[in-house]
Image (cartoon, rainbow, N blue to C red):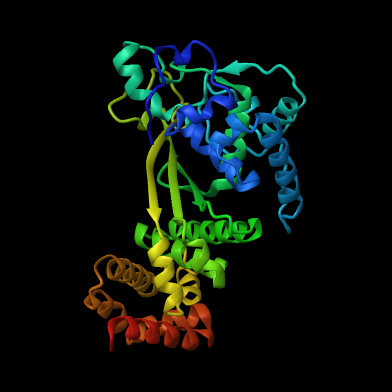
C-alpha cells in the first residue's frame, strides 16, 4: 500500500477518525474506509464532512444487524481478533469487543486515548522510519493513532477478512478483500452478497494453493452473479476488487536476522508483514461473463476448487481462468483453445464427476458452449 504524509506536523498529535481522509494509502485508512463503505455507504471524506458521530452511529446499527443475521456462525466479540498481531502489540485492544465499545463511546462523546499502531497497521511506515528516525527505532513509533481509528480499522478487518490459512512452518497468511462499488443503484443486500461470493472464491482458491487468475476471474463471476440484471446499471461506476495480504513471520524466519540467544525454538515473537496489495477493475470481465451467460457456471467451477488432490480439475480451473482473463485483455480467441481442449480429457471428466456428480454434465456443457461462442467456433 503506501501513502504520503500530510506535512511535518502530522505526528504532533494522534490521528483521529475525522483526519483519515488525509491519510489515504495507509493500512489503517483502508480498513477504516472498508468499514464505512460496507456499513454506512460513506467515505472517509464523509467522516470529515458529515460528522463522525452520525456516520459511526449508522455504522454500528448496520454492524449489529449484520452480526445478528449470521446464520449458524456465532461470533464472540471478546475473542474475535480480526487482525494478526505481534508480541508487542496491545492484545487487549485487538478484539472486536474493544472496537464496538470504543465506537459506542465515540458516539457518546467519551474521551478516547491514543496509542502506537499495532504491527498490522504500521506496515507503511518502514521507509519513513529508515529515512527520518535512524537505526534502532520502530516504524510503529512514527505515528500515533486514536483508539477510534484502531476500532474502525478492526471493524473493517472483520468485514473484509476472507481467509486465514497456514502457509509453511509457523507462517500464517491473512487475506482481506473489499468489493469497492460506489453506485447509487446498488442495494446494500446485493453488495453483501457480492462480498460474500468473492470471499468464498478467494478462500477456496488460496486453501487449495491456486494462483491469482482463479481469484480474479472467480471474483468477477461472483460479482456478476450477485448483481444479476442490475450489473449493467451498477457497472457505470467501476467495479473494484481490492486485495490485501498480510503474513506473520516468526523471529527466526525473518530474512537476514539471527534468532535471539536463548529463544525457544518454534515460539519466537511474531512479526506482521505485507505480502501484497492489488486493485483489480473487474467491470469488463464481469460484463463479459454475464453477457455470455457463463457467470454462474464459472463461479461454481472456481468456488469448488479442491483443497488437495484432483490435480486435473485444479489445472483446468487455472487454465480456464487464465484463458478468460487473457481473452478479456487481448480479445484473441486462441487463449480459449486450451480450456476447450481440456474439457475432452477423460481424467478431467473422471475427477469433475467425482466432485460434482451428474451436475458436471450440465456445467461442462454450459462452459463449452460459452467458450465456443467467445472463440467464434
Spot occupied by residue 301 in the image (x, y as percentages of width and height): 46, 73
- Position of the N terminus, as image quadrant, is top left
Q: Nearer the viewer, residue 184 or 372?
A: 184
Location of residue 35 in the rendering, given as x and y in whole percent from the top left corner: 60, 41
Q: Position of residue 312 (x, y in %)?
A: 35, 74
State the residue at coordinates (25%, 74%): 335
Rendered view: 110 above or below 58: above
The residue shown at (50%, 50%) is 180
Report the residue at 75% width, 43% height from top: 61
Left or right of 335: which side holds 58?
right
Residue 36's quadrant in the figure?
A: top right
Q: Residue at x 37, y 32 (%)?
A: 2
Residue nearer the viewer, 319 or 33: 33
Viewer-closest of 149 and 228: 228
Q: Could you tell whether 229 is left or right of 112 in the image?
A: left
Residue 354 can be seen in this image? yes
Task: Relative to 317, say whether 377 is above or below.
Answer: below
In the picture provided, is 159 more to the left or to the right than 314? Answer: right
Where residue 131 sits, quadrant-wise, is: top left
Does 73 appear above or below 93? below
Q: Residue 79, image x and y in percent?
A: 68, 37
Residue 52 as seen in the image, left or right of residue 210:
right
Would you say residue 78 is visible in this rendering?
no
Quadrant containing the C terminus in the rendered view: bottom left
Amino acid at each position: 500500500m503506501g501513502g504520503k504524509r500530510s506535512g511535518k506536523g502530522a505526528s504532533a498529535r494522534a490521528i483521529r477518525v475525522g483526519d483519515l481522509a488525509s491519510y489515504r494509502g495507509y493500512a489503517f485508512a483502508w480498513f477504516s474506509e472498508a468499514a464505512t463503505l460496507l456499513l454506512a455507504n460513506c467515505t472517509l471524506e464523509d467522516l470529515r464532512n458529515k460528522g463522525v458521530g452520525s456516520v459511526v452511529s449508522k455504522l454500528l446499527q448496520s454492524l449489529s444487524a449484520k452480526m445478528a443475521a449470521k446464520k449458524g456462525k456465532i461470533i464472540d466479540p471478546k475473542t474475535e481478533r480480526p487482525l494478526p498481531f505481534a508480541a508487542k502489540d496491545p492484545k487487549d485492544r485487538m478484539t472486536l469487543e474493544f472496537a464496538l465499545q470504543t465506537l459506542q463511546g465515540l458516539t457518546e462523546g467519551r474521551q478516547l486515548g491514543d496509542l502506537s499502531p499495532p504491527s498490522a497497521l504500521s506496515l507503511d511506515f518502514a521507509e519513513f522510519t529508515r529515512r527520518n528516525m535512524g537505526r534502532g527505532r520502530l516504524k510503529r513509533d512514527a505515528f500515533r493513532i486514536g483508539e477510534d481509528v484502531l476500532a474502525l480499522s478492526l471493524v473493517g478487518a472483520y468485514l473484509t477478512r476472507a481467509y486465514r490459512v497456514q502457509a509453511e512452518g509457523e507462517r500464517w497468511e491473512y487475506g482481506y478483500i473489499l468489493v469497492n462499488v460506489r453506485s447509487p443503484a446498488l442495494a446494500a443486500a446485493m453488495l453483501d452478497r457480492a462480498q460474500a461470493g468473492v470471499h468464498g472464491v478467494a478462500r477456496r482458491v488460496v486453501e487449495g494453493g491456486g494462483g491469482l487468475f482463479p481469484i480474479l476471474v472467480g471474483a468477477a463471476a461472483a460479482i456478476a452473479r450477485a448483481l444479476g440484471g442490475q450489473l449493467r446499471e451498477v457497472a457505470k461506476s467501476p467495479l473494484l476488487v481490492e486485495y490485501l495480504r498480510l503474513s506473520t513471520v516468526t523471529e527466526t524466519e525473518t530474512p537476514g536476522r539471527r534468532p535471539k540467544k536463548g529463544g525457544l525454538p518454534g515460539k519466537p515473537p511474531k512479526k506482521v508483514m505485507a505480502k501484497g496489495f492489488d486493485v483489480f477493475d473487474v467491470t469488463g470481465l464481469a460484463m463479459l461473463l454475464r453477457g455470455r451467460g457463463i457467470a454462474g457456471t464459472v463461479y461454481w467451477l472456481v468456488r469448488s476448487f479442491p483443497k488437495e488432490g484432483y490435480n486435473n480439475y485444479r489445472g483446468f480451473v487455472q487454465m480456464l481462468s487464465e484463458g478468460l482473463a487473457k481473452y478479456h485483455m487481448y480479445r484473441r480467441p486462441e487463449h480459449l483453445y486450451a480450456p476447450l481442449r481440456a474439457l475432452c480429457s477423460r481424467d478431467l471428466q473422471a475427477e469433475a464427476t467425482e466432485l460434482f456428480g451428474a451436475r458436471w454434465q450440465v456445467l461442462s456443457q454450459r462452459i463449452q458452449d460459452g467458450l465456443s461462442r467467445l472463440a467464434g467456433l
